[in-house]
Amino acid sequence: MVVVMAPDATDEQIAHVTERVEGVGGQAFVSRGVVRTIIGLVGDIESFHGLNLRTMPGVAAVHRISDPFKLVSRQHHPDRSTVWVGPAGHQVPIGPDTFTFIAGPCAVETASQTLEAAEMAKAAGASLLRGGAFKPRTSPYAFQGLGVKGLEILADVRETTGLPIVTEVVDARDVTVVAEHADMLQIGTRNMANFGLLQAAGESGKPVLLKRGMTATIEEWLMAAEYVAQRGNLDVVLCERGIRTFEPSTRNTLDISAVPVVQSISHLPIIVDPSHAGGRKDLVVPLSRAAIGVGADGVIVDVHPNPENALCDGPQALLGTELRELASAVRIMPPALGRVDAGERVRG
Amino acid sequence: MVVVMAPDATDEQIAHVTERVEGVGGQAFVSRGVVRTIIGLVGDIESFHGLNLRTMPGVAAVHRISDPFKLVSRQHHPDRSTVWVGPAGHQVPIGPDTFTFIAGPCAVETASQTLEAAEMAKAAGASLLRGGAFKPRTSPYAFQGLGVKGLEILADVRETTGLPIVTEVVDARDVTVVAEHADMLQIGTRNMANFGLLQAAGESGKPVLLKRGMTATIEEWLMAAEYVAQRGNLDVVLCERGIRTFEPSTRNTLDISAVPVVQSISHLPIIVDPSHAGGRKDLVVPLSRAAIGVGADGVIVDVHPNPENALCDGPQALLGTELRELASAVRIMPPALGRVDAGERVRG
Amino acid sequence: MVVVMAPDATDEQIAHVTERVEGVGGQAFVSRGVVRTIIGLVGDIESFHGLNLRTMPGVAAVHRISDPFKLVSRQHHPDRSTVWVGPAGHQVPIGPDTFTFIAGPCAVETASQTLEAAEMAKAAGASLLRGGAFKPRTSPYAFQGLGVKGLEILADVRETTGLPIVTEVVDARDVTVVAEHADMLQIGTRNMANFGLLQAAGESGKPVLLKRGMTATIEEWLMAAEYVAQRGNLDVVLCERGIRTFEPSTRNTLDISAVPVVQSISHLPIIVDPSHAGGRKDLVVPLSRAAIGVGADGVIVDVHPNPENALCDGPQALLGTELRELASAVRIMPPALGRVDAGERVRG
Amino acid sequence: MVVVMAPDATDEQIAHVTERVEGVGGQAFVSRGVVRTIIGLVGDIESFHGLNLRTMPGVAAVHRISDPFKLVSRQHHPDRSTVWVGPAGHQVPIGPDTFTFIAGPCAVETASQTLEAAEMAKAAGASLLRGGAFKPRTSPYAFQGLGVKGLEILADVRETTGLPIVTEVVDARDVTVVAEHADMLQIGTRNMANFGLLQAAGESGKPVLLKRGMTATIEEWLMAAEYVAQRGNLDVVLCERGIRTFEPSTRNTLDISAVPVVQSISHLPIIVDPSHAGGRKDLVVPLSRAAIGVGADGVIVDVHPNPENALCDGPQALLGTELRELASAVRIMPPALGRVDAGERVRG
């Protein structure tokens, strides 16, 4: 941590800072410049936070110089992690050596729609099935999902297709029931800073897919992952799904740079959701190709047997030609870049 | 709702749209232009949503032309509302005729700190006391609040000072206990889209202070208020607290225009939080004056007897000269603009 | 300047940094922490920029700790400046003791429309007339202004009304002709980083009204003012006019906090443009009141005798009731906050 | 164009709108809904703009439904264009069938540095050389480029290496001299809305590389291209280089979705600048791979023989291992996605 003093800071004010720092067991190195004095702090960062250095007289600014996350940081865990998703006997990897294709309907509507979508996903090469039973919706008048009945449908479809299930949980009170049915708990963009939910997911015993808040910085997102990890659960996969910007032609702006940035500072796997980022069916294939190119560990996309009748996000669901194009990209590109299809590395 | 067809849309595609609209009981008016055809829809908007018009072949765009919120809209409720906060016998108004000054510490730390802050607030002219017992923090390593013990301290301080209490609730599971102690439930910026929490607050029987999500549009914010209202609770006060932008010199950018924009489309009262918007003590007084000037129904500010030792947001807490300046602005400006101090309109 | 070394930086890498810094005449203070080493640099910042410290092996980050602007900074010029606008014998102040009301049509269309708008502005209490002869337009198919003929109309209207003229210049090649006719040169939001234009305006001998780029940080804006100042022209007035954000209900988001932030770090006057920020007529009066409340040194607003026929930005031009409300706010509020109307302090 | 009337609009107000529309030769189709009336306009959009429909009494909103750009639109020019860059006898294509790799130093500093960088670029597979002689800099105290001397160095290096030259022009007054030396004129991000410069470039007779304004929407960017095209120059290549967002870990956020979005509405080629978007050397290779994956028509990157001594943007310049990795990606990936290296399609 570095404390920058105001140009007119007095010697007493500088001494006050160093005394407070030393009072909590830290060391303070003072560098007096022509115009300003800066003080470098060495010691336990957490203890320095309690000092409210920014409120002290004569202090102009305080710069943090190390990352605030620990368990998810790559600093003490240099190798990138692999997270395994699925029941014992059929676990699908998400990690640095593989490319994991996850697909399914935005919302579970009926048993037949879900099964049909799952079969489309499987035929296209997906190793995991996504599908929402609990849906967070901006409007209280929109379809909110089938709830527990949706979970049961998903479990049945897993039985039939063999695809492990990724599904969203939107309320800490539902974590137990969702964890009973699902193989991976998704925390959605609107709940990325719902700390009670993050902690509950951390205690669930299931791997977590943590979507980036649509207005969260990468650091805040990793702090959210830290909430999960702190409860003993390091099986967290991050999912970049677009951030809110001024550009209106896409629903959100896919921050493709987040993939290598995250990989440079965290050991957690990271995948991309091109469907929700763009909100447009015609962008799913090119954005998936971009995700593969940039080095993502997987993609998660919406497919629906009949988008015109979808109860949720129909305009971005793939079928027909576009799904075949996507299947082709997912089959061809990752091997050219040194990755194996996750379906070929299932752990028995 | 207006459907814009692509330039190359066929007659069949146009007919398909009008048939689907008529199939759910709506009317479709077709205007054929030189380049494009547009179709105006008349009828029940909710039923049109289910059609996924954007997915239909030949459709280029769909424009919604009416507001999606209903209960909080000014359309069917043209008079602006007043919300009353406090126990029977001492209810403080927040509404169009008054100006309500709310102050207190960011976090409840100890009984004496809370009492001292409450007395500072009262001396400066505040009618309501704010103070956090449950704190949502970006870092799992930061102080998370005293919880129920903090609520008890707040209740004691209300006893002593007579100021009704506004305090945050961060988890749907805590709504009951918070509602037992507090006079108004605050939903914070990170939870604005925590729909389960909004619904629980809507059922609590207490008025709700709903902060804007730091990256929520005004429309999304009003939809969040609609979630509360839908559970039968129309006692919602909105609070503008800054939005996330690219400007780094303030923590967030106070969207001062949101006040008149909200007042033009919703009947709910709206106040401003200049402390959290700027994150800087030196901005609290000028931003409070801006809030009064723009026509806000109140302000909510952080005060602390000893900011250097505050466990939360010390750098923005007022005391001394700045608090006196704020007290002076709150006493002088609203009457000049036609508003009475809320403390003079307490309902017995 | 502070250099933060990577956790695994070697002693050689640290020595390399200090040698380079000392090689250009600076001093380097090394603080070795448990995890990281930080190096505080003291000396001439400009010379350090040439070192490309961020590219050196072992360097994790470089933090600048002083402001990059000099001539416009309040550091060596603590008193806030007053800029005088108008011909010898009738100079209107913009500065910390006064409130300056500037009004006029967005674009000069005809002599009679301009005169009529000027008389509206004067009757409402304006001391300076705004009006555009050269218009930068997003569309090449939109009205681009009358050019030199517009300047002549403005000069005639100044003759009739006595109001000094503020008008925009959009191209360095036009600075001379605009400076011949106008009393103050406006640099618009799209040209804030047009450095050739800034330098030409700096050499024009006329005061400059520098609008904030709609996506410029405050620091970048002050650097643009520094470009003008560097050519010997310190008569620069800043104008906050809204920044680009995700909120769609206003054209831009008025960053009202920019006023006190700028006043804390620069001695230049700062005014607010509520018309272009909101792009909505109904917001001009409340936003002007907010500007007065926050402590702005003036406002600049669009008025038009017949907005329905305006060739530019008709939807935001005031007339009738709203103009009377604005005139009233401008007359009553600033004195209550300690400012005199600029029209009463004209310098003969 | 669609006009949405307010819920309380009167029949007279509706009639007023239709009369004004018919008065300029348009047709107005009125659809009366339960709550609102909407009016669809058919005819010449430009003539409707002059009506200021938004200012008319009873009008709630006006929606534009067609794109405002024409010459650069794909609507009347469905085939995507190829732009040829270079002197007669050696013209390099940028277009839908090829992938064009452009590389060179951010700034021309010396003849030897430029030649060395050009040789690095050529060895890595580049077909065009970039290099700045006129540099727009945020700080007036930063290196502003060598000017005409820099152009002469570039021309000499073209002589030696055979690589056609892309270089920036920052002032309309310099267009002639830059066009005499360069093969393609670059308009930088800060000048995207410098309309005088766009028009001058449009008249220069040379192809134009138009970078996206860092805060421009895609529509505004295409309108800027329209300014160039309107002067008779359709040889415009667009360059996505990142937009300004709240995320601090990269200099700007590369809007990778802009590539397929632009390709769907404009026939102009579009390339990606991964160096300036991220501002970090370690992101150049992954972002270039993302650009290839998403379907960009090329990339433009910074290379420098000695980044530590670069006068401009040293931290993002490639050399050594990273340049080899980039060369490899550029050689292998485009053919796998159906594109030929532009260097193999040079037109004699």
Image (cartoon, coloured by chain):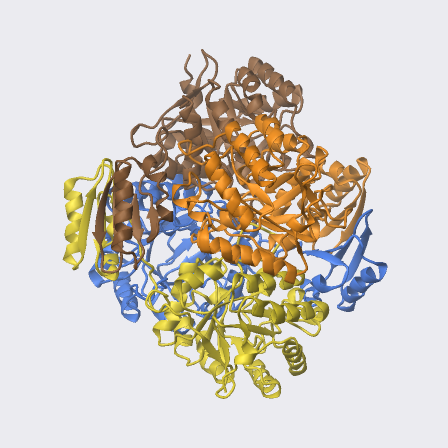
Chain colours: A brown, B orange, C yellow, D blue
Residue shown at 62% from the left, 69% from the top: C332
Q: Is residue D160 above or below residue C13?
A: below
Q: Position of residue C158 (x, y in %)?
A: 58, 85
Placement of the C terminus of chain B among the 4 image quadrants? top right
The residue nearer to you, when weighing A83 against C221, is C221
Q: Is residue A172 above or below residue D250?
A: above
Q: Is residue D101 left or right of residue D122?
A: right
Q: Position of residue B322 (x, y in %)?
A: 47, 55
Residue shown at 65% from the left, 65% from the top: C316
Q: Evaluate whether residue D332 shows in this view.
A: no
Q: Identify the image quadrant of residue D140.
A: bottom left
Residue shown at 44% from the left, 43% from the top: B313
Q: Position of residue A32 (x, y in %)?
A: 22, 54
Q: Evaluate whether residue D15 shows in this view.
A: yes
The residue nearer to you, when weighing D1 against D233, is D1
The residue nearer to you, when weighing B172 against A67, is B172
